[in-house]
Amino acid sequence: MIDDTVSAFSEILSVPYRPGGGPLEGLTFAAKENYQFEGRIASNGNPVWKATHDPAERTARCLRTVLEAGASLVGFTHMDELAYSVIGANAHTGTPVNSAAPDRVPGGSSSGSASAVAAGLVDFTLGSDTGGSVRVPASFCGLYGLRTSHGRIDSQGLLPLAASYDVPGWFARKLEVMVRVSGVYGIPAESGRLPGRLWMPETVWAGVAAPVVESLRPALAKLEARLGPADTTPLPEPVLEDWFETFRVHQAAEVWQAVGDWVSSVSAEFGPGVGQRLKTASATTEESFTAAVRRRSAIRRSMDAMMTEDTVLVLPSAPGAAPLLTASQQDLEAYRHATMCLTCIAGLNGYPELSVPGARVEGAPVGLSLVGARMRDEDLLVLAEVL
């Protein structure tokens, strides 16, 4: 039985579910509370959600994949409400411990998944990523965290937040485990190839704090030694805040499409930040959504022209170390904004992104993100070996 000293788990199975046999035999894992499991109600991070939904009729396809590969399911992990946050605090269930920096938040929304792996309670965990919910906790907790290309992995049975952004993802402490898990999802590292172009757009790096740049410099030097000097050509447009605004509006409309009827029909209380975002989502107009759709399409066209299959885009996974547990709500919202100006790049474009343990700033981890061309997820695993 797992001794959950870090408040990562919402439920620990009294007897682990062990199908046996397969390439993941011997590995233990847990799944985020938005993965459906036959006969169980996924809470989606909110007690009223759990009280107003029926047990799942079948297990999520992406959860069945690792079970059929022989991994042992030991339980389910806490998450931010409805997966609509990247901080890792839940007003109902609390904040899982970030073992890599116990005085700081673990990141969300896959907070418990990252916390469980960082504490060594399991070998890997399943999370989900819409706006950064795998990449950010991986950065904060010093883990490998993969956001897969949008549409590459069957997400049937993963509770939706924003359909054109939602993807399954997973965490591991060791690259070897990350490679094994990725392989059973049809992302074999042995089929990957080393990119030939290292792209570090000045649009991104000019705004990165000096201590973060300095801490990541050894990792960047390894990449340049293998791939050649970085190309600093700017992103197609210079202001990432504009991209984030497109993401924010587009995502909000999809969030309301996914959960709006439920939010409007129940008397659920939501924590700081999440409640405000849901209120904003409810007020998104058809005109603003249509404009965001057009804007996103233009961004994808311009990025696809630059993100050749031979390119890896490199950026910090987050602006810096995780916020302190004592941070004010105002400071947390400001940090979230800065973070999502980075994470929206892959999200808007449906690209895969692998956060790798990069360095430490102020005594806490900061990840380095490798972003690949759409459907070139396996190349990121190959490149991670360079680091």
Image (tube, rainbow, N blue to C red):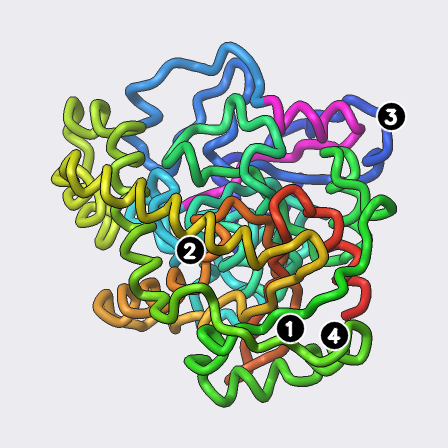
Q: Residues within 10 Å of mark 4 (few under 14, many from 20)?
A: some
Taking the magenta stretch, the answer to whether it contains residue 361 is no
Contact between labelled residues 1 and 2, with CB atoms less than 8 Å apart: no
Q: Residues within 10 Å of mark 2 (few under 14, many from 20)?
A: many
Which label's residue is closer to the chain start, 2 or 4? 4
Which residue bears the numbered disc 1?
358
Query: Which residue is at a point 67% across and 32% down the rendered structure image?
Result: 73
Which residue bears the numbered disc 4?
223
Contact between labelled residues 4 and 2, with CB atoms less than 8 Å apart: no
Q: How many marks?
A: 4
Contact between labelled residues 3 and 2, with CB atoms less than 8 Å apart: no
Query: Which amino acid, by three-letter code, is at mark 1?
Result: Gly
Range shown magenta: 61-79
Which label's residue is closer to the chain start, 1 or 3? 3
Quarter placement of the C terminus:
bottom right
> x and y percent of residue 201 in the render?
53, 73
Which label's residue is closer to the chain start, 4 or 3? 3
Foreground tag (2 vs 3): 2
> x and y percent of residue 66 in the render?
71, 30
Foreground tag (4 vs 3): 4
Q: Residues within 10 Å of mark 3 (few under 14, many from 20)?
A: few
Asked whether the viewer can see residue 249, the reply is: yes
CA gap, disc 2 to disc 4? 23 Å
Q: Quadrant of residue 359?
A: bottom right
Which residue bears the numbered disc 3?
21
Query: Which residue is at a point 41% across and 52% down the rendered structure image?
Result: 299
Query: Which amino acid, by three-letter code, is at mark 3?
Result: Gly
Contact between labelled residues 1 and 4, with CB atoms less than 8 Å apart: no
Query: Which residue is at a point 53% across and 22% down the rendered structure image?
Result: 156
Secondary structure under tag 4 reads helix
Q: Observer-nearest residue: 291 or 254?
A: 291
Which residue bears the numbered disc 2?
344
